[in-house]
Amino acid sequence: MTTTVRHPKTTANPLLARPDGSRATSAWLNARRNEAEAALQHMHKHATHSYALLGPNNTPEVNGALVSKYPYNSDLYRVLLADWHGEAVLPLLEERISSTICLRLVCTFHTDAAQALLMRHVDQPAVRAAVIDRSRRWPVDTLRRLLAQAPSRTQAAAQVLLKLVDEHPDWLAALQTQLAQAPADDAQGSAERKVLERLLSAPAERIPDASPDELPPILRQPPWANRKAQPPLPVLALQALPDEAVVHWDRWQLTPSHGTPKQVVEIDFRCENFNESLSPEASAQTQATENPHCPWSIPKKALFLLGVPPQRLDAVLAAEALQPDDLQSFPTKWCSDRLSYLAVLSDGLAMSTLRQWIHPASQRTPDDWGFNSYGYLSSAFTSLAHHFRHLGPAFTELLLQQSLHKLQKNWVPFLNVLESVDLAAWMSKVGYPSRYHRAYVQQWLNQYAACAAQALIPLAFGADPAQYGHARHHLHWLARNGHRQAIDAQAARHGPAAVQAVAQLLAVPLECLLPDKLPTAQPKWLALHALPPLLLAGSGQAVPQAQVPAVLMCMALSKGGLPYEGLRLVEQALTPDSLSRFALALFKQWEANDSPTKDRWIFEQQGRLGNDATARALAQSIRQWRAGLNRIRAYEGLEMLAEIGTDTALMLLHSFAQQARFGDLTDRATQAIQRVANERDLTMDQLTDRTVPTLGLNERGLLVLDFGPRQFQAHLTPDLTPLLADAEGRPLKTLPKPNAQDSATQAKDAAADWKDFKKQLKTVASAQIARLENAMCQQRRWTANEFIPFFVRHPLLRTLTQRLVWAAFDASGQLLGCLRIAEDLTLVDVADEPFDLDTLPEGSHLGLPHPLELLEDVRNAWGQLLADYGIAQPFEQLARPLHTLTADELTRADLPRYADRLVGTGSLLGLENRGWKRHAGDGGMIDHFAKPVAPGLVARLCIEEGEWFIAGPPPAGDVSHTLRGLYLIRSASSNTTATAAPPRWAELPPIAQAEMLRDLEKMAWHTH
C-alpha cells in the first residue's frame, strides 16, 4: 500500500523512527475525497437521505452514528469524517477494517493509535499486508508492537515478526540492541525481550510461571480477599426527586423503511385476511369495503382504519376535525402501524385526530399505536413530529408508557428523544445484565447523563441489592465517561450526606464493587491441575496455579451476563487463546460432572470467552441437548455461537438454521443469525459471504502444522481432498509421529489441528457447495469489491470457485461476458485471455450464471474448455438438465403429470435437502411438502396421509407414498386479497420453473 507522505524528522538511526502524528496524502485519497464531497453535495441538494445531515460541525459521535446506521456508501463518507475529525474517526474506521477504503484511511494516519488499531487486527490478511508495508517506515517500532502481543509461534503477529526479521537482519540487530539498553525497571521492555527470545528459540515444553510482580493486581491482590478493609457504602433513605419527562424533538431522526404511508394504508386496507380479522361489532359497518377495488380515497381509508365509522367519514373530511365520539372500535384487529396513517391526512385533521386519540375518553391504549409489528416505522413519523411536539404532557406520558419495557429496535427512535427519570432507572436495570442491550443503554445514559444520575443516586444507596448493583455500576460508568460534574450536581440536590456517599462510591475501584454474598467459584468436582495454563499477554508466562481461583471468581461474578469489571481486567491481562482453552476445559469438566446448575456460570462464559474450538464443542453439545429434549440449554448454546461471532461459529449457527430435524432449533438459529446480521448492518446473504471459515488455511491455501523444529503443510486438491507434505513438498500419507527433537506439545496440537481440519472440511465443503448452487438458482450478484475477497482470494472457497463459470452482468441484469478463476487466481475468458473487471460498465455485478442465462454455443464452449483442463464442476452448472413446462401446463395452477404417482420415503426426504419442508394435516400426519419458488408463490406437493407423523420418525426408505398432486399457491405474505385469482405456472420465471421440476425429477419413482 504505497502513499506519498510527509517524512518524519530524521533520527540518528532511521530504524528507530516512530510515528510522528502526521497525516499522509495521495492521489487515491484526493480522488476519494472529491468523490465523497460530490456525493454529499448531491445529498444536501436533494435531501433524500439522512447522509444530508453529515457535516463538519457535527461531533464525531453524531457523524459516526449516521454512517454506521446506514451502510450504503458509508465507507466513502468516512473519508470526509477522517478530514473533519482526524484521529477521532479511528474507532469508526475500525468497525469496517475489512473494507479496503477504511483500511487505507487508517494507513493515512502516522500515529500510535493507528498502529495499535492495525495490530489488533493483524490476523486479517489485508491488515497484515498493511502492517508489513508500514514497517518499512518504522521498523523497530513495528517489531516491538508485535512483540507486545506476546503471540505464540503459530499466531499472525509472530508470523509477521519472524518474516520481517528474516528478511531484514539489520532490523533484528537494532531491536535486540534497543531491548538490551532498556532500563532495568522497564517492565514492558523486559517482557518483550523474553517474548523475542521465546520466538527465536525452540519453545520450552513447560511454560514457566510468572512472578508475582508480573501478575495484574486483580490476581495478585483480589478485592474479595480482604473485604473488611474496605469501608462499607452508606445506606441512605433518599427520595426520588420529581421531574417531568421531556421529549427532545430536535433529536428526532428516522428514515423510510417499509414503504410510504400511502402504501401502508393500502396494504392494511386490503389485507388478505381482512374479513377474518374484523372485530365482531364492526363487521356490519364494513360490508361496503370488502371490494378490493373500493373507490375510497386514501385519507378516507385511513380514517376508517383509525376507527371512524363509515357514516361519519365524509363529514370529518369536510370539517377537517373529529368530534369526541368519532373514534370508535377498530374495523380490524391487525395493523401495520396505525400512527403512520396520520401522515396521509391534512395537518389540521391529523392534529385533531391526535388530540382525540390521546384523550382518555377514546380509551386508546399504547398498544393501539401498532408498534409491535416490527419494521413499519416509516417516514410518516418524521412528517408528524411537528404535530407531536404541540400535544403537551398527555402525549409525553403516553410515549413514556409505551417506551417502558420496549427496548426494541423499532422503538429506538422514540427512546432517543425521550428523557425521563423513570425511563433512566428502567434502562439501567435492563442494560446491566444484558449483553445485547448494554451498548445502547450506555449510549442513552451518556446522552441524558444528568437525568440518569438523578434516577440512579437514590437507588445506588438504597437497601435493595437488585437495585443498587446496576445503579452503582452505571454511576461509575458515567463518571468515567466525563459526567462526574453532572453526578455531583444531582447529589447536591439531596444534601451533604449524598454528596459524601457519591464521592466514596466513585473512589472505590469498580472491580471492588462486590455482591454481599460471593458465589462459589471453585466447585469440589473441579480438577484445577487438569486445566490448561493461562498465559499473560505481556510476557507469555503462565499464571501460577495459586492464582487460578481468582480467575474463576472473576468468571463466577460475571454470571448471568453481569459486567463484572474484574473479568474485563483479566481478559486484558491474559492472551485470548489461553483464556478460551481454559474456559473450554472448564466447560468439559462441568459437562462431565452432570452440569451442576449452581455452577452454570461456567456454561455462560463460553459465549464471552470462546473461540472456534469452543464453537465446535458447543455445536456438538447442542445436537445432543436437543435430541435429549434439553431445549432451553440448546437454545442458549445457539445464542453463545452468535456471541462468539467468529466465522466458524456463525457457519455452525447457519448449519442449525438449515437443518430440518428440529423445527424449533431452525427457528431459533435463524433468529440468532438474523440478529447478528442486523448488528453488523448486513443481510443474511451478506453475512454468510463474510463468514466462510478458512479452517486455518493461509493466503497461499496452506495449512501449516508446526512440530517445532519440523513443519508440515497440507493443501486441497480441486476436489477438496486434503494432501499432506513435508516442508520440502514431499507428499506424505499421514502425519508422522513426533520424534525426540520435536516439541511434544506442539506436535500434539498440530495432530489435533489436522484431525479437526479433515473433520470440518467435509461440513464446510458440503455447506458451501449447496450455498453456491443456491446462489446460482436465485441469481445472486456481487460487486467486484465483494467478488475478489469472498470468492477469488478466500483460501478455502477458491478451490470450489475455480471449477465454476462466472459471468458479469450490467446494471439492468444483461449478461456481458463469462469468465473463470484460473489456477494463479487471475480472471480469464473462454479463450484464456485476461478478463479485466475494471473495464466493466458502472453498476456491473458478477454472479454464477444459470445455464438458462447462457446460449447453447456458449455453454458448449465453456464445457469443452473445462473438459480439456480436466475440471469437474462441484455441482451441475453447464450440464444442468433444463426442464420446461408445456404451453398447456403454464395456464394451470396444478401439474397433472405428478398426480397419482408413487415415490419412496427417501426421495421425499431428499426434497428437504433442496429447500422443501414437510407439513402436517389436522391429524398430525405429513400431508404435503412446500417450497417458496418465487416472491409470494409457493409450490405444494401433496401426498396421501399414511403412518408418517410429524413428531415421529419417517417410514422406511422403500415405503411408497402416493402423490395427490402438485399445486401453485400464493403465500400468506403475498399481500393479495382473498378474492384474487389463483396463480398460474406462467407467473414463475423460467429458472424457477426449471429448478422446481429438477427437484421433482430427481426423485426415484416407484412403479408398484
Image (cartoon, rainbow, N blue to C red):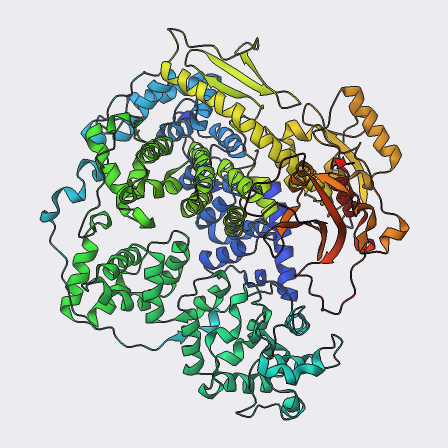
Instruction: Please name the residue shown 86% across and 30% down the image.
Output: 860
- The quarter of the picture where residue 185 lies is top left
Q: Quadrant of the C terminus?
A: top right
Q: Check the image and name the residue furthest to the left.
A: 228
Residue 202 at least partly seen: no
Residue 865 horizontal/vertical position (percent): 81, 24
Most foreground residue, 98 or 180: 98
Which of the pair 20/158 is nearer the observer?
A: 158
- Residue 77's place in the image compared with 116, above or below, is below
List x then y, in percent, for residue 627: 47, 40
Classify 168 as above or below 23: above
Which residue is rendered at x = 24% and y = 50% of the image? 510
In front: 126, or 911? 911
Question: Which one is in front, 382 or 8?
Answer: 382
Q: Quadrant of residue 716?
A: top right
Q: Quadrant of the N terminus?
A: top right
At 41% from the left and 41% from the top, the residue drawn is 113
Question: In the image, residue 408 lies at what x, y percent?
Answer: 46, 61
* Tally of numbered tags: 0
- In the displayed structure image, the side of residue 532 where residue 254 appears, left or right: right
Picture quadrant of residue 243: bottom left
Residue 719 can be seen, yes or no: yes
Locate residue 712, reporting x and y percent. Answer: 50, 14
